[in-house]
Image: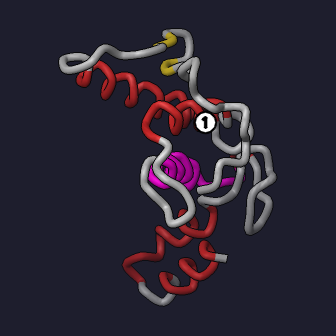
């Protein structure tokens, strides 16, 4: 698996020693369904939980050989939907706050859509959030 390959690449480099857990654990899921070790909740390094959200957002908002970018709204909606399952809800809440700031900055050129103040960013009404298996 990619995260284990990354771990093996970084392990012999002393200056990257602190990053090894992040690389190994960033595909773990908050509910324990991830890999490679099936860790859950606080057993996952907090920095890896942050990296998981950032990595997912990056993957969803960029074209892949097998699909086009989902765009910001759909990517954020999917991450929001996965809070407590794939992602740490506290990390998702912080991510949503950052996205709200980005949306506010963009409001100068286009109006924001579907901002839910109770949890930050709410999924757009037209986002395809029912599919929990969006390919990264």
Question: Which residue is rendered at x = 58% and y = 37% of the image?
Answer: 79
x, y percentage for residue 72?
43, 36
Q: Does any portion of residue 47 appear in the rendered image?
A: no
Circle 1 is placed at which residue position?
78
Magenta segment: does it hold 50?
yes
x, y percentage for residue 81?
66, 31
Question: Which residue is rendered at x = 69% and y = 57% of the image?
Answer: 28
Question: Which residue is rendered at x = 36% and y = 16% of the image?
Answer: 112
What span is in magenta?
Answer: 43-60
Quarter holding residue 5: bottom right
Q: Does any portion of residue 120 appear in the rendered image?
A: yes
Q: Is residue 54 left or right of residue 45?
A: left
Up the image or down, 119 lies above or below 5; here it is above
Q: Secondary structure at mark 1?
A: helix
x, y percentage for residue 128?
63, 32
Magenta segment: does it hold 12?
no
Question: Which residue is rendered at x = 60% and y = 72% of the image?
Answer: 3
């Amino acid at each position: 698996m990619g995260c284990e390959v990354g771990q093996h690449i970084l392990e012999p480099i002393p200056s990257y020693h602190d990053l090894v857990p992040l690389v190994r654990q960033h595909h773990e899921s908050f509910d324990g369904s991830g890999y490679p070790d099936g860790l859950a909740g606080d057993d996952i390094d907090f920095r890896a939980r942050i990296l998981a959200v950032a990595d997912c957002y990056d993957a969803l908002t960029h074209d892949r050989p097998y699909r086009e970018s989902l765009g910001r709204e759909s990517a954020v909606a999917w991450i929001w939907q996965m809070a407590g399952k794939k992602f740490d809800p506290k990390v998702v809440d912080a991510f949503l706050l950052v996205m709200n700031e980005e949306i506010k900055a963009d409001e100068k050129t286009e109006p924001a859509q579907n901002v839910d103040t109770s949890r930050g960013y709410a999924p757009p009404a037209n986002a395809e959030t029912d599919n929990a298996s969006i390919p990264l």
